[in-house]
Image (spheres, rainbow, N blue to C red):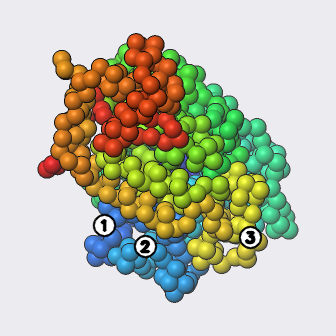
Amino acid sequence: MNSGKIVFAVMPWHSLHLPSLAAGLLSTIIRDHRSGRGYEVETVYANMQWADYLETQTGGLVTPAKYALLGEDLFFQATGEWIFTPALHGEPDWELDAYTQAFEGSPEDLDLALAAYRVSAGFVDMVADQIIAGRPAVVGLTSVFQQNVACLALAKRLKDKAPEIVTIMGGANCDGVQGPALHRNYAFLDFVFSGESEHAFKRFLEHLDGEVPIEQVPNVSWRDAGGASRTNRAGLLPKAADFPIPFHDDYFEQAMSSPVSAHIEPNIIMESARGCWWGQKHHCTFCGLNGMGMAYRSKDPDAFLDELEYLVTRHQSLDVVLADNILDMKYLTTVLPAIKARNWDLRLHYEIKANLKRDQLELLRDAGVWHIQPGIESLSTKVLRLMDKGTTGPQNVRLLRECEELNLTTTWNILAGFPGEDEADYRRIERQIPALAHLQPPSGATRLAVERFSPYYNDPKLGFATRRPSLFYSMLYGLPTAELEDIVYIFDDDKAGVGDAVINDMHRAVEIWQEAYRASTLIMSETADGILIEDRRIGWQRRDHLLSEPVAAAIYRALARPHHAAALAARLEQEGHALGEDQLARHLESFRRDGLVFEDDGTFVALATGTIPYRLRLAA
């Protein structure tokens, strides 16, 4: 082809607040190809157009503020995917009755979904016409989470209207066997890339130039002269040095000019690493992230710092989301101290492991990390062992307490339904949730889903011997079960672990926690008379606890870090506070009765924070 225009379309339900990292990376590769000669590249953020289209076409019912509800919050019901089924199948009532009967959300949420469902076909037509008017040679689609059906619908309309356009698709929804399955089932997809495709896409450009036969492009599915779908072998994973600097200009220009710009808070998205160093050693049993790319690779610290400075300067944004699955621990002695020293006043988001020490959390804060996702998942040590998480319940509570002290916004959730758990594991935590009212609550408590690529998916002996594509997927594609087996990411199973009633009770306890959080504090301070703990938690009597007895104060100071009773006794003895087992037990029981400590598996941790958190206060 040697020249032409390549368009990437970012379809719903990509976040309005983030550029597409995939489109940004591939755009850089195209712009660098043959030193920038030959191809023009553009990214169309159709997700922003969809937010505007929804509001205007539904008479204001589905506002941009509802975008995330449909595309993210209702993920496990595939609501965002189902909304675009009329556009994909050309049937205005595609699986309408079946889906509405199976829908488990509120009537209000269903009304929003139905309104969007009714206008999705018109939107896809509009975007297709817009793209075709620009006369592209190639249109690329990247599919992650609930983008699959919208991407397929657009590819189909493009082929219907302009069959000469080459359609390509990639992303997490095309990883492993998913990519080949999508390619063989949808003839309007010319090429599908599976896995990380920097190397493959460079070779694909050479193929477009007529220099490389398609058989030599790794990771790609294509069609032979007879129309049969073929898939080439996977290539080597890119090294960290091979990750391009993403080109995000199109996003920031369109975010500023969009009719829904008032609802968009543009963030930069970039990556410092891929894969998961913990997962290489201990793959969390429920986790399906990384697919074909678990091997951990992180960027050279100096190269990352240069990229960060370049993107922040270019886009004049201090909000940066790191797409990494987990923070490289080496960055704690390289990148983060350098950012702190430069005093850039950034607002960074990072995913971390939950057992970071306090000085490491302080460094995150001082370097501008304000939002972390620590993968807590549970406060039960036994359940965490079933996950192979490498943390304990009291360690996770200690993290929540220190994040509260350091004003680190923390996103986490509670998962349940693990083979080998029992009701007591949850009731023990549920009883202690009121004492946690002053700490950042989880987003909810839900049953885990069996995800493709997870150990639970790969090894039925771990407890999910019977699995099948999620019920909702059968309403999306209209394909045989054997094909769905290779396409879908979420699987239904015979429920393991605790029953739904236990999980529902835990969820209700979390909702109470969420309601109480902003008006609750439990503040500890040192006074001349000992330790003063001021309890202002919702659900507890307004009370001041003075630990004036030296041994009681010593116990509570020691519990800043989790201790088993035996280890705590040994530490106290070293500090000159020898006391009997019964005496220690009485103190610990008193602390627990007053909600001043959290206990699990015989290990205790203090709950009072040493500082007053900086957050909005409601009436006490």
Q: Which residue position is annotated with label 2?
A: 105
Residue 574 seen in render: yes
Please tell me which residue lies in front, 463 or 297: 463
Label 3: which secondary element: helix
Quick one: which residue is furthest to the left in this view?
A: 619
* 2 or 3: tag closer to the N-terminus: 2
Measured in 3D between alpha carbons, the distance from the residue under mark 1 to the one under mark 3, in whole angstroms, is: 36 Å
Q: Residue 556, how many percent across, how many down? A: 35, 27
Q: Residue 467, how many percent across, how many down? A: 70, 67
Q: Which residue position is annotated with label 3?
A: 483
Q: Amino acid at mark 1?
A: Thr
Q: Nearer the viewer, mark 1 or mark 2?
A: 2
What residue is drawn where x is 63% and y is 27%? 241
The answer to whether the residues at label 1 and label 3 have Cβ atoms under 8 Å apart is: no
Q: Which residue position is annotated with label 1?
A: 63
Please tell me which residue lies in front, 562 or 616: 562
Q: Amino acid at mark 3?
A: Glu
Label 2: which secondary element: loop
